[in-house]
Amino acid sequence: MEILICMKQTFDTEEKIFIQNGEIDDDGVERIINPYCEYAVEEGIRIKEAHGGTVRLITIGGAEAEAAIRTAMAMGVDEGYRLDLTDFPADSDEQTTSECIVQLIKQKQIPYDVILCGYMSIDNGTAQVGPRIAELLGIPHISTITSLTVDGRQVQVERDVEGDLEKVESSLPILLTAQQGLNEPRYPRLPDIMKAKRKPLHRMKWDELRVDVQMIQARTKKVAILPVEEKETGQILSGTIKEQSQELIRLLHEEAKVL
């Protein structure tokens, strides 16, 4: 079984994010594997453990992304690819990411029966990259899965549909995006962390893909990045219902100025 994982590195969820000149200031910020991608990594390793095969991983990023790749290798990934878009000469978005990943798969002839992605990233949250990759490769995809069974060339999945459960069957090759609840990602053991340092990691620059920049540049435009406004402390009204109603009307009129 050939398993391919598309993984993203994101800011640590505990980090406080600062905006400088309309851009996120990532200087010195701690980074982690995107939590939804971590479910994808774990599921890929479980497929290998159950059916044999090889788990490969692709991520886009600079040298800082290698820590996340090595963590995934310590979990059980066999081989990694890091594609650097740092010097990409145009604006990039999910279209750019998807096109570059697909070109990398094709040019390096990376085999796949199952492609696994996190269903979205916790920073941008667009949930577009996985489905876009599947469309570009011409293979079926199922998103937000919470259960997976592989039986020969068939797969049975359960997926989260806004609180409801949907059961779907399909065949390989296929792309699946992982939702919370799919599994419990493992913690790498020290011996596996040491072994991960010796696993093959291939590094490429975007221009080695020989892609048409005009064709894969951003289809969307970033207008602004704004910090989340802190919520003001709430106010509890007391007294009878009539007194509370009168006070609420006064506050809306005099302080909130919405009446």
Image: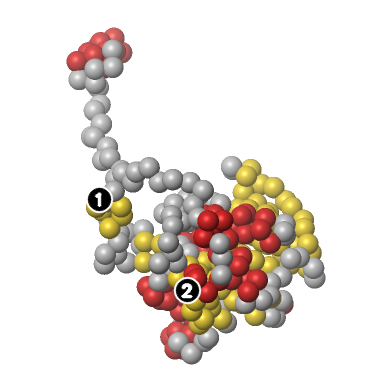
Q: Amino acid at mark 1?
A: Asn
Asked if disc 2 and disc 1 are in contact, CB closer than 8 Å, the reply is no
Residue sitting at x 25%, y 31%: 234
- Residue 94 vs 244, above or below: the answer is below
Q: How is the image coloured?
A: secondary structure
Distance between the alpha carbons at the discs numbered 2 and 1: 27 Å
Which residue matches tag 2? 205
Name which of mark 2 and mark 1 comes first in the sequence.
1
Q: Nearer the viewer, residue 45 or 8?
A: 8
Report crowding for label 2: few under 14, some 14 to 19, many 20 or more residues within 10 A (C-alpha).
some
Quarter occupied by residue 177: bottom right
Task: Name the residue furthest left.
Answer: 254
Which residue matches tag 1? 21
Residue sitting at x 25%, y 10%: 246
For the N terminus, the quadrant is bottom right
Q: Is residue 24 visible?
A: yes
Q: Secondary structure at mark 2?
A: strand
x, y percent for residue 47: 66, 73
Give me the disc on residue 187: none
x, y percent for residue 34: 46, 62
Q: Amino acid at mark 2?
A: Lys
